[in-house]
Image (cartoon, rainbow, N blue to C red):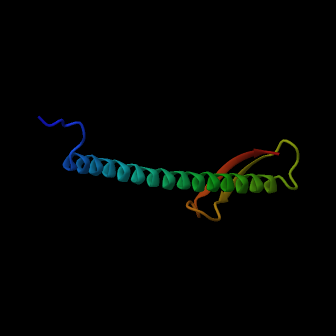
Amino acid sequence: MRSDAGLSLVELLVALALLSVGALALAGNSAAAVRAAREGRVARDEAADARDHLERSAAAACIGATSGDVRLVESPIPKGRFAGARLFAVRTC
């Protein structure tokens, strides 16, 4: 009687094929995660730029105002994904 202690060539090829499919799936998910992280960083930076622009506009609205004046500030977003959208803020000088 012969002992079947090892793997046959067919079993080895099937295992290698399954491993390859898993590795390709992992690579695809990794690429999607990197893309989503990059888009998140861009959105975060654009939101920070819009906030800074609105704060500068609000500060400029108080130039020449007396203490306690309330101003409505309208500021269009100058660049980025939301360029042209308008931001509004109420500023007490």
Report the front residue among 24 and 32: 24
Report the front residue among 48 and 3: 3
Task: Check the picture and name the quadrant holding the N terminus.
Answer: top left
Tell me the residue at 68%/48% (across/down).
89
Would residue 64 be found to the left or right of residue 92 on screen?
Answer: right
Task: Check the picture and name the quadrant holding the C terminus.
Answer: top right
Report the front residue among 26 and 13: 13
Would residue 20 be found to the left or right of residue 1 on screen?
Answer: right
Tell me the residue at 88%/48% (across/down).
66
| Image coordinates for residue 80, horizontal then vertical, percent | 60, 63
The outermost residue toward the left is 1
| Image coordinates for residue 22, horizontal then vertical, percent | 34, 47
Would residue 35 be found to the left or right of residue 42 on screen?
Answer: left
Q: So how many labels did they put on this image?
A: 0
Report the front residue among 81 and 42: 42
Tell me the residue at 64%/61% (across/down).
76
| Image coordinates for residue 27, horizontal then vertical, percent | 42, 53
| Image coordinates for residue 8, horizontal then vertical, percent | 20, 46
Would residue 26 be found to the left or right of residue 56 on screen?
Answer: left
